[in-house]
Image: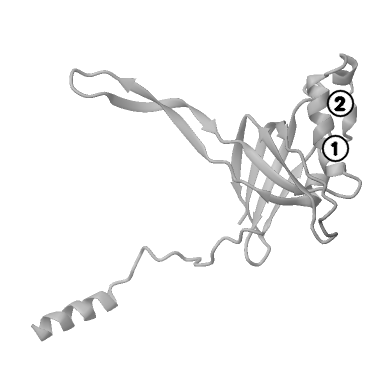
Amino acid sequence: MFPFFSFINIHMATTPTSSTPLNQNFLHPNKFQLTFSRVPNIQYFCQAVSVPGISMGEIPVSTPFVEKYSPGEKAIYDMLNVTFAIDEEMRSWIEIHDWIRAMTFPEDFEQYRELPRLSKNFGNPKTPQFSDATLTIYSSAFTPLYRFKFVDVFPTSLASFMLASQDTPENILTSDASFRYTYYTIDKMF
């Protein structure tokens, strides 16, 4: 019995393991940069961003026995959710507020015509409601690993923020914004 166990241990020690990853570093949750061509202040004040997931529908296929399913034909992307600090001049919050307000023109049509002029980097003047966004994820050595490029981004919600007299100046105000987009691509940077 003893020689059998010795044989297994020797055999296991000499067999190369092909499932060991070459890079065993973990992805750091605080090494990222989010940029929008339309709202530049988010880049400096972004606190958190959720990397959106992707799913697809399924098509039921009837059979006399059980319901079978086939893969759907369209990708369904999760929302791009961002938490950002509000600067003293409130530019990070107001940029998104004004973007939503201009797209919905609550007072008159002239507000929509102002949409291209709200940002110097608004992109295509034929589709001023959209922006492009880029999320760059960095390695532990601050080298770019992946770049997510979001196409035709627009905000769908901007959260309120609370001012409270009992808070101390060390507490920073944050807000959340959600963005819809058409799709994203992932570029490997290394």
- Point out residue 184 in the picture as x, y percentages from the top left corner: 61, 37
Q: CA distance from mark 1 to mark 2?
A: 16 Å
Quarter of the image with the C terminus in it: bottom right
Q: Are marks 1 and 2 in contact (CB under 8 Å)?
A: no
> Quick check: can you spot residue 27?
yes
Q: Residues within 10 Å of mark 1 (few under 14, many from 20)?
A: some
76 up-or-down from 168: above or below: above
- Which residue is located at x 89 percent, y 23 percent? 114
Say which quarter of the image contains residue 4. bottom left
Name the side, left or right, on which 26 lies relative to 40: left
- Point out residue 36 in the picture as x, y percentages from the top left corner: 76, 40
Task: Name the residue beneath numbered marker 2.
Answer: 116
**Mark in front: 1 vs 2:** 1
- Which residue is located at x 75 percent, y 48 percent? 84
- Point out residue 121 in the picture as x, y percentages from the top left corner: 85, 36
> Which of the pair 182/147 is nearer the observer?
182
- Point out residue 129 in the picture as x, y percentages from the top left corner: 77, 25
Q: Earlier in the sequence, mark 1 or mark 2?
A: 1
Farthest residue to the left: give it.
Answer: 1
Q: Amino acid at mark 2?
A: Pro
- Which residue is located at x 75 percent, y 28 percent? 130
Quarter of the image with the N terminus in it: bottom left
> Quick check: can you spot residue 124?
no
Task: Name the residue beneath numbered marker 1.
Answer: 94
Name the side, left or right, on which 123 lies relative to 5: right
Q: Amino acid at mark 1?
A: Ile
**Is label 2 in a helix, a strand or a loop?**
helix
